[in-house]
């Protein structure tokens, strides 16, 4: 009944993901509701706060249903005009439409944007289109039908078989076949088994899981229910990082609603299957994304990984068989059960089936969340979906896989994105961060950045990771400061080999990847720093120097006024000059000069 | 028992099912360096020094936690393994004070020994070094955290053997340390100074305070003895240098206590050479104690006992025995009181 | 019948007691208890950790070990407003370090420090998942995106 009535109503979907919230989505929602009431349209229009539309760069974004008009970068002042034009006059507001950065053309609907066209949204299909805090919205889009299929039509073994057939592989990094993983846990005999959702998305530059948890929490719960039924577990945990308060809030609401609706609890849907689900907030440790560390953390201990075997499927949480998958993996499961393994295998490549969400960020025009079929090329993601490089700069590299991955150069842009191809070039799918870098990014600095991250996040248990990453960082730091030596590269390579070979867990084993990949594809930049004493990208401040081109200088004095350390002197009669001893290379003079008379060079 | 066949360094060997690769190698006298492994503690596979190459495994697994399986092909001395071990040692040494000359542990330090074997020099990696204050807050243990290599054996000994749990890891990454709660000094913690942590420390991070500067391992003769403090019968080694006991170290082979000792057994030996120690019986004559022979003293006691029993009756005497004594000694004492003196007035300090 | 000692009861301690009794006897609760205790007190003092240790019967060394392992836990009192500057990959690539410099200069504090007037504490964090808006700063949980160093002063003024 309620749905019938709802159909008549038009909807305004307001992205209320973390990105858009920070650019004012909340006040837009308030303003929209007030305006709708003021204009007497409450019967015709509802405002729905949704999860992430994925189009973070353009936020806050609004989508009008059913016609799917997309407005970007909406401001509070636009609201009354929007309501008036959209609902009273049926007119579009040109300036709020999305403009393609490459063609300059305006696009009316979300589905027609280049950002969206090449995507294949399965896991993200609800994100941005439903109110994540309303279970009715989820149900209206076939929610919990996958669970019903599993419970009513399939035995646990058949559920696992279906997932195996789908070819789904773990979306958290290494890509272990999900169905196989489940079957290990199912085969272990025990009085109690656990399933865990790894929502400790700590990879800097990745927010896919955040998008799903905030925008479609029920899909994760449904996936876990199906997995638990297959494995024979009656208790689960979602381990979500505390840095994602909105995700935790939406999950809590979703669990409560699912309990009330009979999807969680005792005798679910009359099947005799019981399942209880708890949330645990992580407390800020990247290493807890590692399975054994994650379980230690749930047990209330220091999140230090332990040696495997025994694998979690034999001895996991509180020594009971445990199955851990990440958010995206769990969230893919309901679709597979509902639409069949056959349907799922149409997406992707032979060995990597289905779709993968990437967080596209960095120096790219359309930052945001994108879901693409496995096997798509990096070029398509960055240039077609991402709209190319910001400010028409030159592409240099894309960092894929975060601290466990690597930076890939232009020559690999046509590489198909799947587990095997990426590993073969020294990167990995990882959790799915894609950080685009342009010519102004220094690859030594980026390698230093990632190793610094890994050494800070090392749990400190095993020697190679604790001591080795620290030394790699120190060597890279010296190179960026102009104190590098040629033999440092050999030392880096030796350390990288040993850390990879002998570290206890995945964090350590993969931490050298960014360094190795950079040394492989961007060795020239390392050599420039060491041999030529210069940073080609002009990033490493140690190599920078500034001087004033007196031909261009108009003696306006702006640089003198703004220099924080009074390093610039000159007046109407004497030429301006920078005292390099005093200069701290902050670059304010370059930004302030209106005549491009302050010249920065990357060589000391 | 089921037996497995493995190939270690090209040689076929058979080992019982269920043991680790490390145990298999050691059973066949193949030397594998370890820092965090201890046969009586849980394995944590933290130091990674025991890595080996196993066919079919991508990385170098730690042999201490890898269970041997039928047909396993193991290489313990390949270049890859050697490079890993040497680099790990270089990394440990890079973060370790190189004051071996004055270190109490010299000659008995596993890190120094392996560094020597693998030809590790101290200047491969430059950078930050852990520099932490010395904890000499108590008379028994010197804790020099700057020398700690974070093998965690002390933590496990404290938790698993002494079941006291005073020590644990804190902070993380390069900043990780071992210590009592709130980074307090041992004297301010719940530590009972059993010294189990000292007994397992492979480097100079935990040493016996009383032994500092008193003798090097090669100057010391170890004399196994039974602890005189109580009737438990713990065994340990007196460390003797030039006829003087300079310390006590526990011995894993001790039948009763293994490596464990209490604070008195491990650290309470200073009485041996105390100038005030009684060496002969003393008899009070004219208000002053005078040295006497044992015969003299025992005769005096026997006379007095007889006199008291005869004049005042046996029940005016009572005997209080001590936990210092063995069961047998305590038995003899009560037998003596009942059968010889004729009283049931017998008690013991451990009875409450 | 009124008892004057009631007035001496510390409301924060009452809250902590409630948290402890809610979790007591359950397994694996140390992390959530520390999180809630920090929520109540703003940081974890030795006293609070000792109380948690006693009540939950977890060794003090273990409580301390856990509290110092996770970056979320703070062992010192914090300022009124907590600034978390993200230096994750996307923010790094888009100039997060310059924003950090601007904050450091403006407030004269570094990572992990608190201003002398107790108004702000500064923390560097790895990623808060708002990469689309890089570089970002989160103040008391509100995310400010697409920052440039020049805007820092103006934003901080909103937090008195």
Image (spheres, rainbow, N blue to C red):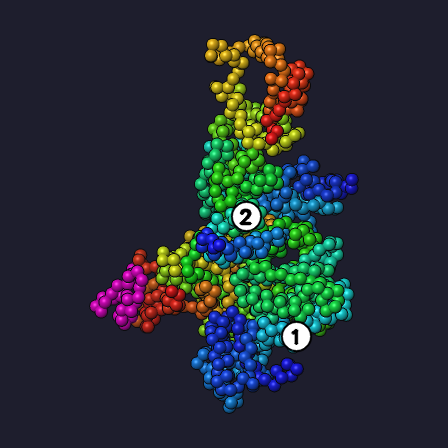
Secondary structure type for disc 1: helix
* Residue A415 appears in the picture as rendered: no
Q: Local crowd at mark 1 within 10 Å, few (<14), some, or many (≥20)?
A: few
Q: Is residue A71 left or right of residue A562?
A: right
Residue A479 to residue A255: above or below = above
User: What is the crowding at mark 2: few (fewer than 14 residues within 10 Å), some, or many (at least 20)?
Assistant: some
Please tell me whether mark 1 or mark 2 is closer to you in this view.
2
Instruction: Please determine whether, in this image, residue C110 is positioned above or below residue A33.
Output: above
Say yes or no: labels 1 and 2 on the same chain.
no
Q: Is residue A558 magenta?
A: yes
- Whether residue B282 is situated above or below residue B83 in the rendered picture: above
Q: Position of residue A56 (x, y in %)?
A: 51, 72
**Cβ–Cβ under 8 Å for marks 1 and 2:** no
Find the magenta span and give its range.
A553-579
Residue on which disc 1 sits: A139
- For the stretch drawn in magenta, the main secondary structure is loop
Give how far across and how far down residue A265 sits, in percent: 68, 64
């Amino acid at each position: 009944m309620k749905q019938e009535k709802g159909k008549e109503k038009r909807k305004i979907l307001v992205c209320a993901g973390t990105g858009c919230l920070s650019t004012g989505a909340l006040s837009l929602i308030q303003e929209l509701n007030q305006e709708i009431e003021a204009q007497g349209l409450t019967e015709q229009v509802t405002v729905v706060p949704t999860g992430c539309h994925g189009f973070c760069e353009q936020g806050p974004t609004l989508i009008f249903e059913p016609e799917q008009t997309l407005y970007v970068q909406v401001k509070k002042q636009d609201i009354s005009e929007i309501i008036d034009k959209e609902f009273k006059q049926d007119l579009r507001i040109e300036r709020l439409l999305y403009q393609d950065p490459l063609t300059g053309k305006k696009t009316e609907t979300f589905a027609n944007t280049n950002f969206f066209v090449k995507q294949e949204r399965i896991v993200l299909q609800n994100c941005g289109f439903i109110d994540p805090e309303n279970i009715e919205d989820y149900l209206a889009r076939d929610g919990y039908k996958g669970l019903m299929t599993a419970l009513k039509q399939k035995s646990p073994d058949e559920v696992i078989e279906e997932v195996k057939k789908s070819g789904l592989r773990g979306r958290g990094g290494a890509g272990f076949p999900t169905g196989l993983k489940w079957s290990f846990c199912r085969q272990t005999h025990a009085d109690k088994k656990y399933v865990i959702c790894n929502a400790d998305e700590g990879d800097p530059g990745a927010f896919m899981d955040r998008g799903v948890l905030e925008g479609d929490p029920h899909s994760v719960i449904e996936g876990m229910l199906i997995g638990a039924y297959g494995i024979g577990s009656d208790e689960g945990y979602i381990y979500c990082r505390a840095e994602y308060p909105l995700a935790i809030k939406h999950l809590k609401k979703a669990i409560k609603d699912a309990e009330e609706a009979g999807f969680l609890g005792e005798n679910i849907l009359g099947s005799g299957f019981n399942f209880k689900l708890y949330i645990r907030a992580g407390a800020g440790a990247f290493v807890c994304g590692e399975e054994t560390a994650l379980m230690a953390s749930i047990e209330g201990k220091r999140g230090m990984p332990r040696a495997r075997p025994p694998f979690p499927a034999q001895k996991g949480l509180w020594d009971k068989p445990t199955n851990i998958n990440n958010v995206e993996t769990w969230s893919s499961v309901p679709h597979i059960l509902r639409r069949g393994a056959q349907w799922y295998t149409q997406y992707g490549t032979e060995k990597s089936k289905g779709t993968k969400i990437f967080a596209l960020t960095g120096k790219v025009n359309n930052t945001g969340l994108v879901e693409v079929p496995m096997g798509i090329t990096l070029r398509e993601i960055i240039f077609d979906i991402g709209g190319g490089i910001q400010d028409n700069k030159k592409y240099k590299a894309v960092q894929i896989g975060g601290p466990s991955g690597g930076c890939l150069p232009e020559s690999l842009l046509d590489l198909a994105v799947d587990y095997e191809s990426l590993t073969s070039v020294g990167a990995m799918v990882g959790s799915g961060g894609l950080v685009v870098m342009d010519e102004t990014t220094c690859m030594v600095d980026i390698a230093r950045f990632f190793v610094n991250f890994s050494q800070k996040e090392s749990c400190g248990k095993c020697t190679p990771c604790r001591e080795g990453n620290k030394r790699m960082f120190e060597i890279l730091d010296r190179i960026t400061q102009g104190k590098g030596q040629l033999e440092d590269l050999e030392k880096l390579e030796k350390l990288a080999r040993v850390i990879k070979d002998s570290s206890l867990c995945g964090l350590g084993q993969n931490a050298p990847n960014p360094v190795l990949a950079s040394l492989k594809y961007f060795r020239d930049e390392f050599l420039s720093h060491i041999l030529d004493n210069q940073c080609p990208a002009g990033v490493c401040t140690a190599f920078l120097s500034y001087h004033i081109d007196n031909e261009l200088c108009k003696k306006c004095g702006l640089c003198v006024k703004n220099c924080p350390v009074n390093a610039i002197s000159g007046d109407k009669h004497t030429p301006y000059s920078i005292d390099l001893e005093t200069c701290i290379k902050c670059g304010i003079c370059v930004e302030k000069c209106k005549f491009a008379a302050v010249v920065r060079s990357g060589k000391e | 028992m089921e037996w497995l066949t493995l190939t270690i360094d090209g040689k076929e060997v058979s080992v019982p099912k269920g043991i680790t690769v490390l145990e298999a190698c050691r059973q066949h006298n193949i030397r594998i360096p370890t820092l965090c492994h201890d046969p009586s503690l849980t394995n944590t596979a933290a130091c990674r020094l025991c890595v080996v190459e196993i066919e079919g495994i991508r990385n170098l697994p730690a042999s201490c936690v890898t269970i041997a399986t039928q047909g396993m092909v193991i290489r313990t001395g390949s270049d890859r393994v050697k490079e890993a071990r040497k680099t790990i040692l270089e990394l440990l040494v890079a973060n370790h004070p190189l004051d071996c000359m004055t270190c109490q542990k010299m000659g008995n330090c596993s890190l120094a020994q392996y560094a020597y074997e693998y030809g590790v020099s101290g200047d491969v990696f430059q950078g930050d070094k852990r520099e932490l204050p010395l904890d000499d807050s108590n008379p028994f243990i010197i804790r020099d955290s700057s020398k700690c290599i974070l093998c965690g054996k002390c933590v496990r000994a404290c938790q698993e053997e002494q079941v006291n749990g005073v020590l644990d890891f804190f902070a993380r990454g390069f900043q990780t340390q071992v210590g009592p709660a709130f980074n307090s000094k041992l004297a301010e913690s719940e530590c009972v100074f059993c010294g189990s942590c000292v007994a397992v420390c492979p480097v100079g991070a935990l040493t016996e305070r009383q032994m500092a500067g008193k003798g090097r391992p090669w100057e010391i003769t170890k004399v196994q003895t039974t602890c005189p403090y109580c009737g438990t019968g713990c065994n340990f080694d007196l460390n003797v240098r030039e006829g003087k006991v300079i310390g006590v170290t526990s011995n894993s082979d001790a039948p009763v206590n293994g490596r464990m000792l209490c604070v008195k057994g491990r650290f309470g030996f200073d009485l041996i050479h105390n100038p005030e120690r009684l060496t002969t019986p003393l008899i009070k004559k004219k208000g002053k104690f005078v040295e006497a022979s044992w015969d003299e003293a025992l005769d005096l006691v026997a006379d007095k006992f007889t006199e008291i029993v005869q004049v005042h009756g046996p029940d005016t005497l009572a005997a209080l025995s001590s936990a210092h004594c063995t069961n047998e000694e305590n038995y003899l004492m009560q037998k003596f009181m009942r059968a010889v003196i004729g009283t049931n007035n017998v008690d013991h300090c451990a009875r409450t | 019948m009124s008892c004057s000692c009631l007035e001496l009861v510390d409301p924060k301690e009452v809250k902590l007691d409630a948290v402890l009794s809610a979790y007591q006897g359950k397994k694996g609760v140390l992390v959530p208890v520390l999180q809630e205790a920090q929520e109540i007190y703003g940081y974890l003092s030795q006293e609070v950790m000792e109380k948690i240790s006693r009540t939950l019967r977890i060794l003090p060394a273990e409580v301390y070990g856990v509290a110092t392992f996770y970056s979320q836990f703070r062992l010192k009192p914090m300022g009124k407003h907590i600034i978390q500057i993200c230096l994750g990959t996307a923010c790094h690539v888009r100039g997060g370090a310059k924003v950090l410099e601007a904050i450091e200069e403006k407030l004269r504090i570094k990572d992990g420090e608190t201003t002398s007037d107790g108004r702000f504490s500064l923390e560097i964090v790895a990623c808060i998942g708002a990469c689309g808006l890089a570089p970002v700063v989160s103040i008391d949980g509100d995310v400010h995106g697409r920052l440039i160093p020049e805007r820092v002063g103006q934003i901080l003024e909103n937090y008195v």
